[in-house]
Image: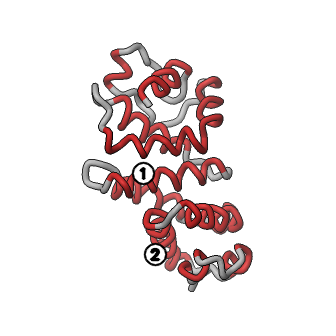
Amino acid sequence: MIDLARYLRDESPVADTAAAFPVREDELWAVWGTVVEAAVAGGDADRDRLVALLVALGPDGRSWFGAVMRESWDIYSPPGGDATEWARLNDFAARLTAAGIDYLTYAVWTLRDTLEEQETVPPELRPAVKPWFEHCGQLLHDACTAGEQRPYTTVGAVAAREGVTEPGFSLARWDFWRRRA
């Protein structure tokens, strides 16, 4: 089994750690849960190392990771989750997206829930928005410019009242997010 604590202390190269991952699918759910927990509990350097590991594993090596991320999204998101942990999970997802592991739909979910649903943006939730612009600003803008559509990316009530009518990515939504962020 992988020793994430050792890996995060910079004692193990990415390739060695990737090679040590279990191949049994019945173990992967627990392993991925541990990776997400480490990303949420750790700092920027830890999240960077975990992103590097996931990139090194490649798509075939990340079996079930997306499902664990989706479940984690529900666990950590407000109102039930802690705002700091929620911001860290968003930071992890944004770093993954910037590295080519696409969680851009999660950006829409966070930006919608934080910026589009309430008249006043809850200050404790603002830190969850920042990493998407910091790590993926160009990707978000490009998706909005292209009018990219993704499932489950409906527009929030406040954004709709202000003229954002298209789900997915649009320049109107981009402008709304930038004004509210």
> What residue is disc 2 on?
30
Q: Residue 165 or 137: which is nearer the viewer? A: 137
Dot 2 lies on which element? Answer: helix
Number of other residues with Cα within 10 Å of mark 2, as a class: few under 14, some 14 to 19, many 20 or more: few
**Residue 15, quarter of the rendered image:** bottom right
Closer to the chain start, of discs 2 and 1, is: 2
Dot 1 lies on which element? Answer: helix
Residue type, mark 2 in image = Ala
Q: Is residue 127 left or right of residue 78?
A: right
**Residue 50, quarter of the rendered image:** bottom right
Residue 137 versus residue 80 in the image, above or below: above
Residue 149 x, y percent position in the rendering: 55, 30
Residue 144 x, y percent position in the rendering: 59, 26
Residue 111 x, y percent position in the rendering: 43, 36
> What residue is disc 1 on?
87
Residue type, mark 1 in image = Ala
Q: Is residue 10 left or right of residue 172?
A: right
Q: Residue at x 42, y 41 (%)?
A: 110
Q: Residue at x 32, y 32 (%)?
A: 121
| Circles 2 and 1: CB atoms closer than 8 Å | no
Residue 58 x, y percent position in the rendering: 70, 63
Quarter placement of the N terminus: bottom right
Q: Residue 153 or 118: which is nearer the viewer? A: 118
Q: CA distance from mark 2 to mark 1?
A: 22 Å
Tell me the tag on residue 96: none
Residue 65 versus residue 124 in the image, above or below: below
Q: Residue at x 32, y 44 (%)?
A: 124
Q: Residue 58 or 45: which is nearer the viewer? A: 45
Q: Residue 92 or 181: which is nearer the viewer? A: 181
Quarter placement of the C terminus: top left
Q: Is residue 81 left or right of residue 109?
A: left
Residue at far top of view? 163
